[in-house]
Image (cartoon, grey):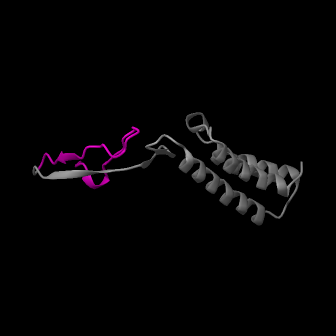
Amino acid sequence: MDLNFDKCEIMSFNRNQELQNDYIMKDSVNGKAHLVSRSRIQKDLGIWIQSDLKWHSQVCSAASKGNKILGQVLHGIRSRTQMVIKLLYTSLVRPHLEYAIPVWCPYLQKDKRILEAVQRRYSCHFWF
């Protein structure tokens, strides 16, 4: 199986993003040189990693998925009993908000507010 050079990317974790070298990979079959592109954000195992090691894109992704599923739950379920909605929230929405949270634990207040907004949207509809 050959390496697809178009899918190869480099991400550097340093403060000065301008002082970075270009990387060239040579094809072992025909000796052709390929310039490897740079990436500031990459998704690995479902977690968005940024080159500045901030987790804002992961927080926004988790909140977006949580809001989408919460909207489907709120609009698509006729039975609005406390038990049913709580079960759907804990089984469908919370896993997206809490996926791999020990790795990307939100430490900035703006990121915490984004995640709490999803939980607040749920709690505003149902007073338990």
**Left or right: 3 with respect to 114?**
left
Magenta stretch holds residue 25 = yes
In terms of depth relative to the viewer, which is nearer, 84 or 128?
A: 128
**Left or right: 44 with respect to 58?**
left
Magenta stretch holds residue 119 = no
Position of residue 79 relative to residue 113, above or below, is below
Which residue is painted at 12% across and 49% down in the image? 29
**Left or right: 103 with respect to 109?**
left
Q: What is the residue that sits farthest to the left in this orientation? A: 30
Q: Which residues are magenta?
A: 1-29
Q: What is the residue that sits farthest to the top in this orientation? A: 102
Q: Residue 118 at x, y = what percent?
A: 72, 52
Which residue is painted at 46% across and 45% down in the image? 50
Q: Residue 63 at x, y = what percent?
A: 64, 52
In terms of depth relative to the viewer, which is nearer, 47 or 55?
A: 55
In terms of depth relative to the viewer, which is nearer, 24 or 13?
A: 13
Q: Residue 105 at x, y = what percent?
A: 60, 37
In terms of depth relative to the viewer, which is nearer, 32 or 108?
A: 108
Which residue is painted at 54% across and 50% down in the image? 57
| Magenta span dominant secondary structure | loop
Which residue is painted at 78% across and 51% down in the image? 120
Q: Residue 46 at x, y = what percent?
A: 51, 46
**Left or right: 23 with respect to 31?**
right
Task: Determine the image quadrant of residue 104.
Answer: top right
Number of callouts = 0
